Image: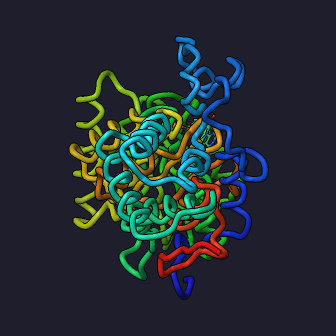
Amino acid sequence: MPADTNSGTRSRAGFFARLKERLLGPEGDTDAGTTAQPAASPATDPVVAAGTATVVPAPSARKPSRFRLGAALDWLAGRKFDEQTAEELEMHLLAADVSLETAADIVRRVRKKAGGRNVVTIDDARQVLREALVEILEPRAKPLVIPAAPRPFVILMVGVNGSGKTTTIGKLARRLKDDGFRVMLAAGDTFRAAAIEQLQVWGERNDVPVVAQQAGADPAAVIYDAFEAARARGIDVLLADTAGRLQNKAHLMQELQKVVRVMRRLDPTAPHETMIVLDASLGQNAVAQAKQFHEAIGLTGITMTKLDAGGKGGVLLTLAGELKVPVRFIGIGEQAADMDVFDAAEFAAALTGTSLAGTSPGGTTTAA
Ligand SMILES: Nc1nc2c(ncn2[C@@H]2O[C@H](COP(=O)(O)OP(=O)(O)O)[C@@H](O)[C@H]2O)c(=O)[nH]1
Ligand SMILES: [Mg+2]
């Protein structure tokens, strides 16, 4: 068994540089003219790419088409943080999937920070914003730690169809296996045969066993069987997939509650992690989903996917502000290496186009 069971706690070199490029464009996009840019072309517009039927009209000239908060604050350089600048910042935040409540909180923090110091350069302004974002994100940046007991440690993956559950299980299986854990997968999404096959492909790819039954089987029974098999085979971590779409929402939640009830016959402390997988490109809808699942079954972790695919990242600020559930991982692609531990400081730096080097932890930035 691995010595220090910290599979979820370290991030890999280069991951956040890639995230930054996805969110801001190449070189972090220091273009301060964001507010004057036209809308993205329909072919590359994130809303259209996400499959929404409606073609969104060109946003007002000031509305950024992507989450470029670094540029959003650049106009603050050399200006007093007054009502107008506060309003402009709030507008940029709302356009980036930040909720009204969380945007107001961020503005309040920025105002306080900007008031006490000399914000002269663009970099000064970006640093002020970065510090405010870190304050909001930091309390949620609690990595997933697999303790030495119990065994198996059961992770129940939930979330709506297409959010990236099965893919995240595959990525996590790889990560855990690389760290020396013995991993097993349970094909609890029995709604479609294709969902079972998809999990089996990830199992083969990572050389980890998959417990599955035929489509239409009772998910609670599949996961119960997998739990017993995992115990018998000395498995460290059992990753249980689930369906994200049944007849209706109430039915889905009942199904998940049943899965939990049944696995608790084997271990009253299970599941040891109930992780929701959220698609960042859904914006505020992702936040609403998280709240619904949290209410119905109680979440202990969040993985945010598709930050490469139109997800603006602001949704993570809303989640951090409004839901006290740890953010474990973020995903920026479909391959096993396209997922990493959520790091508040790195994420805020990526969002604002600032670098971690050269930041002043004391919080005072003065003119040269
Ligand atoms: N671009 C991108 N695509 C992703 C990411 N995570 C998952 N996907 C894709 O999203 C689609 C749905 O993922 P899947 O795991 O099947 O979702 P599930 O229905 O929740 O199990 C698949 O085509 C995945 O390859 C991500 O971080 N970025
Ligand atoms: Mg799936």
Identify which residue, 3 or 139, lies in the foreground.
139
Residue 287 visible in rendering: yes
- Using the rendered view, name the quadrant where residue 61 is placed: top right
Q: Residue at x 40, y 73 (%)?
A: 151
User: The N terminus appears in which quarter of the rendering?
Assistant: bottom right
Residue 153 visible in rendering: no
Q: In the rendering, at what x and y percent does residue 225 appear? A: 39, 53
Identify which residue, 265 or 253, lies in the foreground.
253
Q: Is residue 362 above or below residue 57?
A: below
Please state the total of marks drawn on the protein image.
0
Q: Residue at x 68, y 58 (%)?
A: 206
Q: Residue at x 78, y 52 (%)?
A: 27
Q: Is residue 67 above or below residue 74?
A: above
Identify which residue, 211 or 343, lies in the foreground.
343
Q: In the rendering, at what x and y percent does residue 7 appear? A: 55, 73
User: The C terminus appears in which quarter of the rendering?
Assistant: bottom right
Quadrant location of ligand 1?
top right
Q: In the rendering, at what x and y percent does residue 69 appear? A: 55, 47
| Image side of residue 66 versus residue 192, left or right | right
Identify which residue, 145 or 345, lies in the foreground.
345
